[in-house]
Amino acid sequence: MAKEIPDLVAEARTGTGKGAARKARREGKVPGIVYGDGKDPLPVQFEFNNLLTKLRAGRFMSTLWNLKVEGQEDVRIICRGVQKDVVKDLPTHIDFMRLRRTTKVNLFIHVEFINEDKAPGLKRGGTLVTVRPEVELVVTAGDIPESVIVDLEGREIGDSIHIGDVKLPEGAKPTTDRNFVIANIAAPSALVSEEAEEGGEGEAAAEAEGEAEAEASEE
């Protein structure tokens, strides 16, 4: 299933250059430009607070957006640069690139776990520890997967699930060749404490045995 692409609403901006950009900022807007795909650059502007909220939410530059400008067809874009005020650290200009449906892009895709009820390790009280709730993949702009599915069936306590263990959506691949960990099944705290105590008792017994042997040799 293709992932739903979030909308990013903008207004067409009349005029270009520093004067037009300053005018947009005085009106509480953030000026921007959309370029690429063999078409003329499109000057746009965004409502400041709305854009700032999206920027602060994270992953802005690795998110594929559906740009909506009144009177024009929607277009898929990805951010290629955000200029900020050096003192206030607030956006002053933003650049976007148009994408074709066949364009390859790097995006963070949500990880979804299934068959938790079929994992022996979880039934025994183990805990699923998620190392990466999202994984960065190279995907096609026209076919973005909704999620990466991780099957937990048969997983035991102590198991680690690597990216190489997961069947990725068709056409998607990791951005790195490293076989990184997505999640693992940790032992329940009671079991960890019990093993620690057993280990301590074993060490104490070995120490006592060593002392007895030392005393016997002295005699």
Image (cartoon, rainbow, N blue to C red):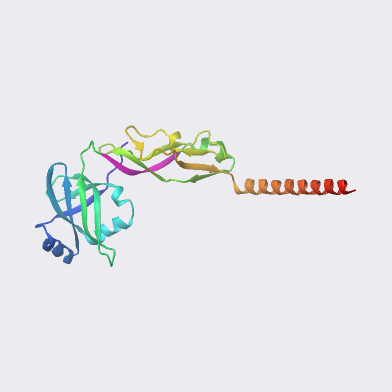
The boundaries of the magenta stretch are: 104-113
Relative to 17, is 7 on the left or the right? right
Residue for point 27% across, 65% down: 86
Query: Which of 60 and 118 lies nearest the eye of the viewer?
Result: 60
Within the magenta stretch, is there residue 158?
A: no
Residue for point 53% across, 33% down: 154
- Point out residue 209 in the picture as x, y percentages from the top left corner: 80, 46
Query: Which of 126 and 17 lies nearest the eye of the viewer?
Result: 17
- Point out residue 76 in the picture as x, y percentages from the top left corner: 21, 44
- Point out residue 207 in the picture as x, y percentages from the top left corner: 77, 48
User: Is residue 154 placed above or below 185 in the rendered structure?
Assistant: above
The image quarter containing residue 64 is: top left
Query: Which of 164 and 212 lies nearest the eye of the viewer?
Result: 212
User: Is residue 143 placed above or below 192 in the rendered structure?
Assistant: above
Within the magenta stretch, is there residue 108?
A: yes
State whether the magenta stretch is mostly helix, strand or loop.
strand
Disc count in the image?
A: 0
Query: Which of 88 and 3 lies nearest the eye of the viewer?
Result: 88
Relative to 61, is 113 on the left or the right? right
